[in-house]
Amino acid sequence: MTNEVSKIRSFTDLTTWQQGHKLVLMTYQMVKKFPRDEDLGLKIQMKRAAVSVTSNIAEGFSRGSYREKRFYEMAKGSLTELQNQSLIARDVKYIDSAEFATYAEHSVTVLSYSLV
């Protein structure tokens, strides 16, 4: 029964959530290097935006109705917000160009999976 094995039973089975979760972990590792004066600034904003991506995917999945696609739209909005914040982090030299490139590439990967 191959169909049973490939059934999506939980939000954690969604490739979009899995890739988003990797982005959350990348974000938490990246912001550890930010200066202490960013603890209540860019650092917390990036962590919240990253968590918002996967949280909205999970919530949208649990609602089980196509009408609840607004949660997926919110996840895309949070992901775009995170992309902007990573540009800022690069431009103020909190991360280098190579780290930014890897992070940006992964955020595009998350965005490439259909959320809506």
Image (cartoon, rainbow, N blue to C red):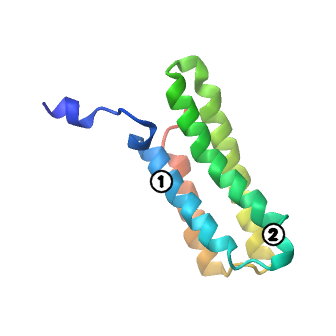
Q: Residue at left 53%, top 37%?
A: 58
Q: Is residue 19 left or right of residue 28?
A: left
Q: Position of residue 79 (x, y in %)?
A: 65, 50
Which type of secondary structure does the marked residue at label 2 adopt?
A: loop
Q: What residue is rendered at 62% in x and 66% in y?
A: 28
> On the rendered image, what quadrant is the C terminus found in?
top right
Q: Which residue is found at the position 60% from the left and 34% from the top?
A: 72
- At label 1, counting other C-alpha atoms closer than 10 Å, the crowd grade (few under 14, some 14-19, many 20 or more) is some
Q: Nearer the viewer, residue 39 or 60?
A: 39
Quadrant (top left, top right, bottom left, bottom right) of the N terminus: top left
Mark 1, residue position? 19
**Residue 84 located left or right of residue 59:** right
Residue 24 placement (x, y as % from top left): 58, 58
Measured from the top left, where is residue 113 in percent x and y?
Answer: 48, 44
**Secondary structure category for the residue under label 1:** helix
**Which amino acid type corresponds to the residue marked 1 in the rendered image?**
Gln
Type of amino acid at the residue the image marks with label 2: Asp
Residue 36: percent from left, percent from top: 82, 78
The residue singled out by tag 2 in the image is 39
Assess disc 2: are there few (<14), some (14-19) or many (≥20) residues with their C-alpha within 10 Å of its C-alpha.
few
The residue depicted at 71 percent of the width and 65 percent of the height is 86
Tell me if residue 3 comes above or below residue 55 in the rendering. Answer: above
